[in-house]
Amino acid sequence: NFANDVFDHEKGADTEARLGPTRAAASGLLTPKALYVGMVATFGLALAVGVYLIAVAGWPILAIGIASILSGIAYTGGPYPLGYHGLGDVFVMLFFGFVAVCGTAYVQLDAVPRDAWIASVPVGALATAILVVNNVRDRVTDVDAGKRTLAVRFGRRAGEVEYLLLVVAAYAAPVALAALHASPWPLLPLLSLPIAIKLFRDLRALEGAPLNATLAGTAKLLLLHGVLLAGGLVGVKA
C-alpha cells in the first residue's frame, strides 16, 4: 500500500477526480519521501521476519520472499508496472491467494497439502474481487492516468463477469472440500453467500463513488468467508 500510494502519485494517477478513498500522498497527508521511508521500513520488517522463517522452513521461503517484495514494488512501480497493464488481477490471485495460503502451510507443515491449495482459491479470488470493484469504479479516470486495467481494456460488463466468476470460485472451493472429506463442515462459508449475492447486485447497479461501499463490503466478505472456512477445516479435523 505504501508503494502503490507513492508510485501512483508520481505517475499522476491520483488526481482530484479520484473516486476512491483518500490517498496519503495525493491529499498531502504524507509526503512522498515519508511514504518511501514507510515502504522501505515495511519491506525491511518483512525481510527480518523472513530470515526467521528461512531458518524454520528453509530456502524456498527466501525465493517466496524475494518474489513477493519485487512484485509488491513492480505492481505500480518500475518500468512496467503490473497494475497499469492489466496484470494486477493475476498478481493478487497469485500472491494474496496461493503464495499466502500455501506458503503459510509450508512453513508450518514442511509440505503443501491438497487442502491448502484448495483453500487458497477463495482467499485469492475474493482478494482479486476487491481489485475488480476498484477497477470498475475507476475505469474512466484510469484511462486518463494511463492505466490499462482489465476493466479499461474490456469494459464494465467484463468486470462484472470477472467478479461473478471469482465469487463462484470462492464458493466452489468449500463444496470441493466437503466432497473430498465427506463432511459438511467445509460448507460453513456458504452462510455468507447472501452477502456475496447482494454485493454482486450492487456492483451491477452502482456507479462511481458509491462503489466504495461495495469494495469495503467485498473486503469484509473475504474476512468472513476466511473465518468460516477455517472453522470448517477445524471441524473436519476435530
Image: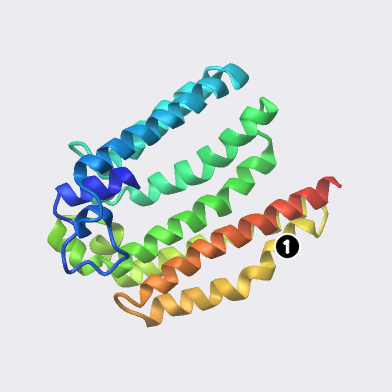
Up/down of 134 relative to 76, above or below: below
In screen coordinates, is 204 left or right of 175? left
SS label for mark 1: helix
Where in the figure is residue 220, as x and y percent of width and height?
A: 54, 64
Residue name at image x 49 percent, y 65 percent: 218
The residue lying toward the viewer, choosing from 111 and 4, is 4
The residue lying toward the viewer, choosing from 190 and 217, is 217
In screen coordinates, is 125 left or right of 116? left
Render colour scheme: rainbow
Up/down of 76 relative to 79, above or below: below
| Mark 1 surroundings within 10 Å by alpha-carbon count, few (fewer than 14), some (14 through 19), many (20 or more) | many
Q: How many marks?
A: 1
Hey, what amino acid is under mark 1?
Leu
Q: Which image quadrant for residue 16? A: bottom left
Where in the figure is residue 196, as x and y percent of width and height?
A: 55, 71
Q: Which image quadrant for residue 158? A: bottom left
Residue name at image x 62 percent, y 28 percent: 107
Q: Looking at the image, which residue sits at the far right?
A: 238
Up/down of 32 relative to 199, above or below: above
Residue name at image x 22 percent, y 52 percent: 25
Where in the figure is residue 87, as x and y percent of width and height?
A: 32, 47
- Disc 1 target residue: 188
In screen coordinates, is 126 left or right of 88? right
Q: Looking at the image, which residue sits at the far bottom?
A: 205
Residue name at image x 31 percent, y 62 percent: 135
Where in the figure is residue 106, as x and y percent of width and height?
A: 62, 30
The residue lying toward the viewer, choosing from 7 and 158, is 7
